[in-house]
Image (cartoon, rainbow, N blue to C red):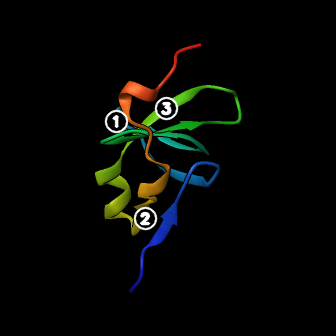
């Protein structure tokens, strides 16, 4: 069975680090987490390990290094 590839812009549904079920668009991929923005414009963190348990794989080419992340 092949995994589904998740990249920036993908729409996914998963459990957050606070065990809350959310659906939204992937905005940022960090080392161990993925940042998802939902329909209410709120952001949520999802562990990459949680995505892997559900058959999703993160696209390593869109990984953003912490030193390159700029805060607005």
Q: CA distance from mark 3 to mark 2?
A: 17 Å
7 left or right of 1?
Answer: right
The disc at residue 6 is: none
Q: Where residue 36 sits: x, y (%)?
A: 54, 38
Among the two numbered marks 1 and 3 on one chain, the one whose residue lies closer to the N terminus: 1
**Label 2 packing within 10 angstroms: few (<14), some (14-19), many (20+):** some
Position of residue 24 relative to residue 3, above or below, is above
43 left or right of 54?
Answer: right
Identify the element where label 1 is drawn.
Answer: loop
Position of residue 63 relative to residue 60, above or below, is above
Q: Where residue 29 sits: x, y (%)?
A: 45, 42
Which residue is at 44% across, 39% downward?
Answer: 64
The quadrant in which residue 3 appears is bottom left
Q: Could you say which is closer to the camera, residue 49 or residue 32?
A: 32
The disc at residue 56 is: 2
Identify the element where label 2 is drawn.
Answer: strand
Quadrant of the image containing the C terminus: top right
The disc at residue 44 is: 3
Q: CA distance from mark 1 to mark 3?
A: 8 Å
Identify the residue at the far bottom of this view: 1
Q: CA distance from mark 2 to mark 1?
A: 16 Å
Which residue is at 34% across, 36% downward?
Answer: 17
Identify the residue at the far front of this view: 68
The quadrant in which residue 26 appears is top right
Q: Where residue 12 sits: x, y (%)?
A: 57, 54
Identify the element where label 3 is drawn.
Answer: strand
């Amino acid at each position: 069975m092949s995994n589904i590839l998740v990249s920036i812009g993908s729409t996914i549904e998963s459990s957050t680090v606070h065990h809350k079920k959310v659906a939204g668009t992937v905005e940022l991929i960090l080392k161990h987490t993925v940042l998802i923005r939902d329909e209410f414009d709120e952001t949520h963190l999802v562990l990459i390990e949680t995505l892997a348990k559900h058959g999703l794989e993160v696209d390593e080419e869109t990984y953003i290094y912490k030193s390159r992340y700029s805060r607005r």
